[in-house]
Every structure is written in C-alpha cells, then in structure tokens.
Image: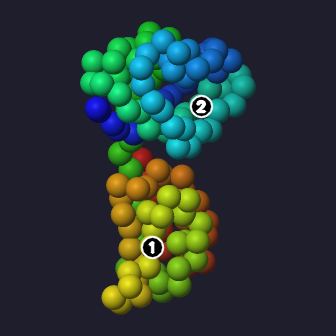
C-alpha cells in the first residue's frame, strides 16, 4: 500500500464537478479530506490523504490532472519560535490530530510533523504568535 498527503488545486471551472466522488468510485483508493478551501466560481485547494496500491494511486492522480487539477505533495513547515513560545499549551487544545502535544519530561510544547495536516488551527490559538506555517 502507498500512502501520502497531497495538495489539490482546483480551477474554478471544475469546482462543481464531483471529481473526488468519481475518483473513489473509479479507483480502488481510500482518501480522507484533511483540509479544504473551495469557493464556487473561484476554485480552491484541498489537502487529501490518499492510500492505495502505487499503480492505482498514480492512475487516480492522472485522472485528476486530466480534469485540470494541479497536484503537489504536501510539504509544510510548521515552526514554533522558541524565543516567543511560553509553552502555555493553548495551541495543543486546538490541534485536531494531536500533532502538537506537551512533552511529559519537561512540560514543553512539541510537534509530531507526521501527524500535522497543516490545518493552521494552532496559529490563531497561540496568544504569543509563536507558531508559523508555510507551504512549499
């Protein structure tokens, strides 16, 4: 099985087309929508977790590209500024995946980047603006 997270960029002319539904029906892949920002008549983006046999995943991605969807791997940097962070844990409570957590040994906020879905809910939760997220 092949599993990875990708970012899909939908042009405005395909927003109304149920491409992900068609993808699920046509290809033997499992997916989870990790984040989506799509607007009618404007296009948008979706972070998708995709799992399946390597060849099938490749075919599924070619299907999306054939419909004008741009695909890129999810590569994000989440940075906690050590000089600004007070390790109050306000961000931890907002993290839906548990990627941010408090270390038991020294009570500091830590990040498990494998769990991060780049939802950015931690950014406004930090009262000290110590967290930044950037996409590559």
Vertically, is 64 above or below 1?
Answer: above
Q: CA distance from mark 2 to mark 1?
A: 30 Å
Label 2 SS:
strand
The answer to whether residue 108 of the structure is visible from this angle is yes
Q: Nearer the viewer, residue 129 or 121?
A: 121
2 or 1: tag closer to the N-terminus = 2
Vertically, is 123 above or below 118?
Answer: below
Decide if residue 12 is on the left or right side of residue 34.
right
Q: Residues within 10 Å of mark 2 (few under 14, many from 20)?
A: some
Q: Residue at x 55, y 72 (%)?
A: 91
The answer to whether residue 81 of the structure is visible from this angle is no
Q: Residue at x 38, y 74 (%)?
A: 110
Q: Nearer the viewer, residue 115 or 27?
A: 27
- Tell me the number on the disc at residue 101: 1
Vertically, is 62 above or below 86?
Answer: above
Disc number lying in front (2 or 1): 1
Q: Which residue is mark 2?
A: 44
Give coordinates of residue 25: x percent, y percent: 53, 15
Give coordinates of residue 89: x percent, y percent: 53, 80
The quarter holding residue 43 reads top right
> Which quadrant holds the N terminus?
top left
Decide if residue 8 is on the left or right side of residue 124.
left
Give coordinates of residue 109: x percent, y percent: 43, 78
Q: Nearer the viewer, residue 135 or 111?
A: 111
Q: Residues within 10 Å of mark 1 (few under 14, many from 20)?
A: some
Vertically, is 41 above or below 82?
Answer: above
């Amino acid at each position: 099985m092949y599993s990875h997270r990708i970012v899909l960029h939908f042009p405005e002319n395909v927003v109304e087309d149920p491409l992900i539904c068609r993808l699920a029906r046509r290809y033997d892949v499992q997916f989870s929508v990790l984040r989506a920002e799509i607007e009618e008549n404007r296009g948008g983006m979706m972070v998708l977790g995709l799992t399946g046999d390597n060849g099938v995943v490749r075919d599924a991605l070619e299907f999306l590209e054939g419909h004008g969807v741009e695909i890129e791997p999810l590569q994000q940097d989440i940075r906690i500024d050590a000089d600004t962070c007070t390790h109050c844990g306000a961000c931890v409570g907002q993290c839906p995946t548990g990627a941010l957590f408090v270390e038991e040994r020294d009570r500091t906020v830590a990040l498990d980047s494998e769990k991060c879905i780049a939802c950015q809910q931690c950014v406004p939760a930090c009262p000290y603006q110590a967290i930044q997220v950037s996409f590559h």
